[in-house]
Image (spheres, helix red, strand yellow):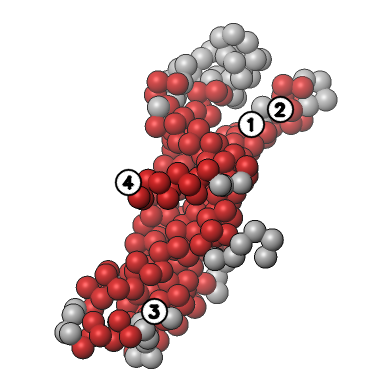
Amino acid sequence: RNFLYIVFRELKNAPYTAWLGMILVFGYIFIAVFASFLAPYGESQVFPNSYAPWSKEFYLGTDHIGRDILTRLIYGARNTIGIAFLTTALAFVIGVSFGLIAAITRETFIDQFLSRFVDVLMAIPLLIFALMLLSIVGPSALNLIIIIAILDSTRVYRLTRAVALNIVVMDYVEAAHMRGERIMWIMRREILPNIMPPLVAEFGLRFCFVFLTIAALSFLGVGIQPPTADWGSMVREMAGLIQFAEFDTQAAITPLLPAAAIAILTISVNFIVDWFLHKTSGLKDGE
């Protein structure tokens, strides 16, 4: 009951930007979860009239091979957001685990090896490295998740190690060592709960970066592969409509719809993360 009261009080005092971000994010989640019920047609269903204009039959028209754009947008929410969430979660499992190991074994060979290996990976631009690896192993959803998660876990590792180093020197951690507690127990019960606020905020930011990276790779043709609906590939497929913008307003707006969906979700998550960081930083309004 006390926890629910605290949550309600914090949400009540949240700024309008945070509320807007939460409403939009929950809207995206609702669409992603119930995509099969909300979409008017099948995800890969093809109709004979390609580039059909907006109408009662096709609210946002059809694409270059006759697929309903509204349906593709709805299913794209489930595929793009779902894959981005799984990738971010896997990146955190890897990054947090090795970050805690490096922090608790500080100044040892394990810490030095992990840190130098991460430095090497971070020296290579993530998008270019992912593009190269996906070109080698082949573009698939599983390869995309694993590669992006491993590359993005380096950022999570650096943050986890940095904040955990301030905790491992505390007296209660030393007391746990002296009691003979196992390292895994110390990491799970003593260190991890005390570094959760920055990790939760970082999860939101990492999700945005992973989300944009997957969309960029799909736009380049090595991300989520057709016929699976994805916002990044939709931007690429409908980019040719822009050349008809002078003669048809709908042709100018249609390619912007998946791009707008990407931008709105990214901004909404950042609104929530900014509010959460402000609450957990200990600063008061006006400081």
> How far separated are the C-alphas under marks 3 and 4?
30 Å
Label of residue 257 in the image: 1
| Residue 109 pos. (x, y %) | 34, 89
> How far separated are the C-alphas under marks 3 and 1?
46 Å
Question: Are discs 3 and 1 less than 8 Å apart at CB?
Answer: no
Give the residue drawn at x 62%, y 42%. 16
Question: Between disc 4 and disc 2, whose residue precedes?
Answer: 4
Question: Are discs 2 and 1 less than 8 Å apart at CB?
Answer: yes
Question: Are discs 3 and 4 less than 8 Å apart at CB?
Answer: no
- Report the side of 249 relative to 47 (left or right): right
Q: Is residue 97 visible?
A: yes
Query: Which three-letter amino acid code belongs to the residue tagged 3?
Result: Ile
Helix, strand or loop at mark 2: helix
Disc 4 residue crowd, few under 14, some 14–19, many 20+, Cα 10 Å: few
Query: Which three-letter amino acid code belongs to the residue tagged 2?
Result: Ile
Question: Between disc 3 and disc 4, whose residue precedes?
Answer: 4
Q: Which residue is mark 3?
A: 167
Give the residue drawn at x 49%, y 68%. 155
Q: Which residue is mark 2?
A: 253
Question: Between disc 3 and disc 2, whose residue precedes?
Answer: 3
